[in-house]
Image (cartoon, rainbow, N blue to C red):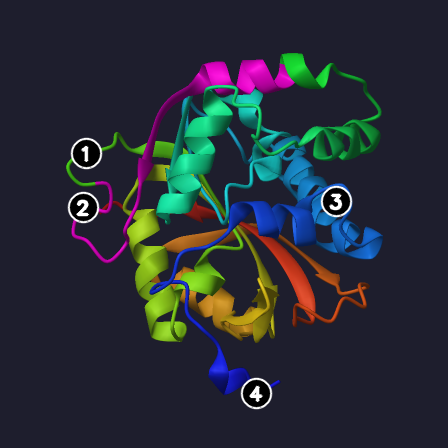
Amino acid sequence: MDSSACSHHFTEDVDPTFIHEMYCGPYAEEKFICDAIEFPIRAILNCYKQGLIKGDTMIDFSYAGNIFQILAIYKCFKDIIILEAYDSCMTDTENWLQGGEIALDWSHAARIMEELQGTSADWKEMENDLKSRVRHFSKCILENENPTDPIVLPKADCLVNLYLLGTISKDLDHYSRNVKKLSSMLNKGACMIIIGAFNASYYIMNGKKHHSLGFTETDLRKILSDNGLRVAHMEVCERTSCIKTATFDHIFVVCAEKESCD
C-alpha cells in the first residue's frame, strides 16, 4: 500500500472498539499483544521499581480509550485525570466510567500484569478502584493554548501517553511541539512516560490506512532534551509480530523527568 495515501487522526475520529478488537483486545494476534501490551506493562513496572513514578496526580492522555498502560501504576496516585483526543473516545471513556455494558474489557491486560508481578488480583475490584481515583476526564486538543479549555487542570506529577503522539503529529517539529505542550501540564521533577513505535509508517483501521509518524530513538532523545526533559529510563523491544496491518520496527517506553520550570 502507498504510505502517502494515509489518513491523519488530527482530522478524523477513531474507532476504539475496532482498535480494541484488532490490536489490543484478548483476541488480537498473540505476538502483537506481547509487543504492544505486555512489553509496555513490563517496562512501566521497571520504572516504578526504580522509584521514578511518584506523586499525587497522574494524567493519562492515550490512544483509543486504552487503559492497560496505567494498570501497573494507578495505585501510586490519589487523583487521576483522563484526557481524550477524540469525541468517540470521550464517549467510550464515559461509558467505561459509568459501568456501561458495552465498555471495553481489559481483564486480559490485568492478567498479563499479574503474571509479570507474580501476584493475583480480582479484576473487577481493581477496575472499580481505578475508576474511583478518576477525578476528571476531558477532551484535549493540543493545538489550543489551553488544551482542556475551558477547564484549567492542576499540574500533574506523572503523564502517560500511549501510542497517541505518533498518530497526531504530522512531522518531527509537530511531535516536538506536542511534547512541549504535554510537558507544560507537569510539575518540575515530574515524569512523562511515552509509549510509541520507532520507524512506523501506518496502520489499518476499518480497512483504511492511517498515519503513524516515522522517527528514530535519536530523534526522540533530541526532542525530549530540547524540551527540558531528561531521559531517566528507556526500554526498546524489537518487533516480533508478523501482523501486516501495522508497520513499525520497535516499540519503546521512555520515562523522562521534567527538569525545567515553564
Q: Quadrant of the N terminus?
A: bottom right
Is label 1 in a helix, a strand or a loop?
A: loop
Q: Position of residue 30 (x, y in %)?
A: 83, 51
Sequence-first disc among 3 and 4 = 4
26 in relation to 201, above or below: above
Q: Which residue is mark 1?
A: 152
Give how far apart the Cα atoms at labels 4 and 1 are. Answer: 41 Å
Sequence-first disc among 2 and 1 = 2
Judged left or right of residue 66, residue 55 is left
Give how far apart the Cα atoms at labels 2 and 1 are. Answer: 7 Å
Q: Which residue is mark 2?
A: 146
Amino acid residing under circle 4: Asp
Sequence-first disc among 4 and 1 = 4
199, 43: nearer the viewer: 199
Name the quadrant containing residue 192.
Answer: top left
The segment highlighted magenta reads: 126-148
Sequence-first disc among 2 and 4 = 4
Is label 2 in a helix, a strand or a loop?
A: loop
252, 21: nearer the viewer: 21
Q: Which residue is mark 3?
A: 38
**Dot in front, 4 or 1:** 4
Give yes or no for contact between labels 2 and 1 (Cβ–Cβ under 8 Å): yes
Please rate how many residues cluster around mark 2, counting C-alpha atoms within 10 Å: few if below 14, some from 14 to 19, many from 20. Answer: some
- Residue 78 visible? The answer is no
Q: Residue at x 31, y 35 (%)?
A: 138
**Dot in front, 3 or 4:** 4
